[in-house]
Amino acid sequence: MPTEQEQRPTEAASGPPTMADVARLAGVSAMSVSRALKGNAYIAKDTLERILAAVDQLGYVLDQSAGSLSSRRSGFIATIVPSIDNSNFADTARGITDALAQTNMQLLLGYTNYSIKREEELIESMLRRRPEGIILTGGEHTDRARAMLANAGIPVIETWDVPENPIDAVVGFSNADAMEALVDRLVAQGYSRFGFIIGTENTDARGRQRHIGFNRALSRHGLISGRAVSIEATPMRMSHGAEAIRQLLHLFPDTDIAICVGDLPAFGAIMECQRMGLAVPRDIAIAGFGDYEIASVAEPGITTVNVDPYGIGAQAAGQMIAMLEDRSAAATVKTGYHVLLRGST
């Protein structure tokens, strides 16, 4: 898929709220706000509640670096990923780091374990150190996280997604469109009885979008949808794929192809099929998503979608560098993806 870039005005160009703004909204002195947020003095309960309500409303973050960074420059870019043991997100972090090597900036990395509440906590903690900018994974955040980011006064880039209401800049792709492209190729191969394997949809926004794309493609081709198995796990691992393929074939024994939300459960599904005496793809075909290294070395190789995670990181860092030089450079950069047909289908 070609890369597209669309310039648009930024929503996060205004300066961050100050302690004085919080004090004014709460009807207290700036000193009271400082004492309350540092937690080193007694503050009446009702006063503290007003201050905290004002903090939430304004998206204010206490600047813990103010006393030690007179230049107001921290020299690092904050990056938040869902997992550090996922090779795709590790590649994205590596892409960011390599692109930042041309600057004097360093990477501060945090991971959420797929929890947007944990993401909110990390955003607040990182913003207290006043990073030069922040790079996020995905476009779903808590309201408080969005408020903090929108008021931070620094470049914010959302990756691995193309959110409808971006905070600032975007470097990513449509997970729904990418999955739809995979289904189209598999329909062209002659498959018609599709199953889908996914984890916990309310914590895996990108997996949920892939499921949407799967159903959208089946509807367009006039095929039966709703043949899916959800395993209560995020992220899905190989063992989850093994468990899920057994459930899928029990519920829908005529399935001729199962698409997994990622390559790891796809590998687990293939191994379980072999244990069950089923040949892949003769008896049932399996496909994944993400083009993990295991997809190319498995036997048979796993049909999947390559989304260039390293490139996402490198382009995000490049966009960040451009925005640090000129805030009006904020853009939506649509990254590419392509379907890889291998021996599992």
Image: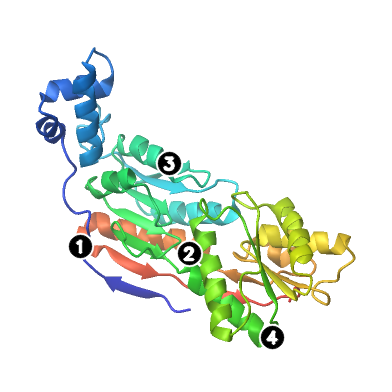
Q: Earlier in the sequence, mark 2 or mark 1?
A: 2
Mark number displayed over residue 117: 3
Q: Quadrant of residue 261?
A: bottom right
Judge left or right: residue 243 versus residue 339: right
Q: Residue at x 17, y 40 (%)?
A: 17
- How many other residues sit within 10 Å of disc 1, few (<14), some (14-19) or many (≥20)? some
Locate residue 59, reporting x and y percent. 24, 41
Q: Residue at x 38, y 52 (%)?
A: 135
Q: What amino acid is found at the position of numbered circle 4 in the picture?
A: Gln
Please, is residue 285 above or below residue 119 in the view? Answer: below
Residue identifier under label 2: 311
Q: Quadrant of residue 55?
A: top left
Q: Earlier in the sequence, mark 4 or mark 3?
A: 3
- How many other residues sit within 10 Å of disc 3, few (<14), some (14-19) or many (≥20)? some
Q: Residue at x 27, y 46 (%)?
A: 147
Q: Earlier in the sequence, mark 3 or mark 1?
A: 3
Q: Earlier in the sequence, mark 4 or mark 2?
A: 4
Residue identifier under label 4: 189
Instruction: Measure the alpha-carbon separation of dots 4 and 3.
Output: 42 Å
